[in-house]
């Protein structure tokens, strides 16, 4: 299966998840279009200025300009929130939730996490629209590594796990259902490139 292939999961999608391609309302679209144009002009000017500074060998001012650009981006996002009523959160995916710097936890629908093959540690953005829709976006994937293991079931929680040697990883039920995996199957999982993790993303089932 190709990474860009559309996936339909067997379980029903979370009603609160509208996806990254949700259609905005007309009023919001008009406001966003104007703000987007403003932001693009600022980006163009900032990049042009940074390029000129680097060509002149002035790395100190170029670095300062980039810092100002990042701060301006945050200010722009705050303006969008004020104008549209949307609320933006950024955080780290922990296998089931987006955990923000403030310690808030927002549940990520299993279908979305499975389809996107999210890995514990990925940076994500959550936009809560005025009408209560949740739009998720993966903004900074961490480095991944593939591992092969055996699909099993946790005897206590009755939830799917993958056993790799002496290590045990949790995997989402939605991805197991889609791949029609059963205990004993050999599977390929994705885990963080370094360090330990509790969760893994199920990439595919190899068979028994």
Image (tube, rainbow, N blue to C red):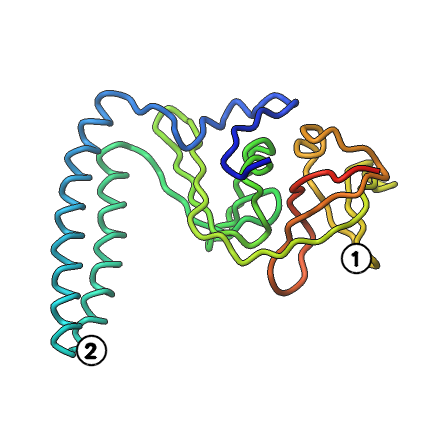
Q: Is residue 130 above or below residue 114?
A: above
* Residue name at image x 60 percent, y 37 percent: 114
Front-most of 71 and 13? 13
Residue 202 in percent (x, y) is at 67, 42
User: Taking 130 as reference, is 175 left or right?
Assistant: right
Label 1: how many Cα within 10 Å (few below 14, some 14–19, many 20+): few
Tally the marks.
2
Label disc, if present, on residue 167 of the rendered structure: 1
User: Taking 73 as reference, is 5 left or right?
Assistant: right
Residue 125 in percent (x, y) is at 42, 44
* Residue name at image x 13 percent, y 71 percent: 53
Residue 90 in percent (x, y) is at 42, 48
Please give the residue where the numbered disc 2 appears in the rendered image.
60
State the SS at label 1.
strand
Front-most of 100 and 62? 62
State the SS at label 2.
helix
């Amino acid at each position: 299966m190709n990474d860009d292939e559309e996936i339909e999961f067997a379980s029903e999608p979370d009603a609160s998840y509208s996806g990254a391609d949700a259609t905005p309302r007309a009023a919001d679209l008009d406001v966003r279009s104007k703000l987007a144009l403003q932001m693009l002009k600022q980006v163009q000017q900032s990049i042009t200025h940074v390029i000129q500074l680097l060509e002149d060998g002035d790395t100190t001012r170029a670095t300062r300009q980039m810092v100002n650009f990042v701060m301006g981006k945050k200010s722009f996002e705050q303006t969008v929130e004020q104008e549209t009523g949307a609320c933006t959160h950024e955080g780290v995916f922990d296998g089931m939730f987006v955990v923000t710097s403030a310690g808030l936890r927002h549940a990520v629908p299993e279908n979305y996490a499975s389809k996107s093959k999210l890995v514990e540690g990925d940076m994500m953005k959550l936009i809560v629209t005025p009408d209560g829709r949740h739009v998720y976006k993966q903004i900074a994937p961490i480095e991944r590594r593939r591992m092969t293991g055996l699909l099993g079931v946790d005897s206590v929680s009755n939830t799917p796990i993958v056993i790799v040697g002496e290590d045990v990883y949790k995997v989402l039920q939605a991805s197991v259902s889609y791949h029609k995996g059963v205990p004993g199957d050999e599977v390929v999982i994705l885990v963080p490139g370094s360090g330990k993790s509790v969760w893994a993303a199920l990439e595919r089932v190899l068979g028994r």
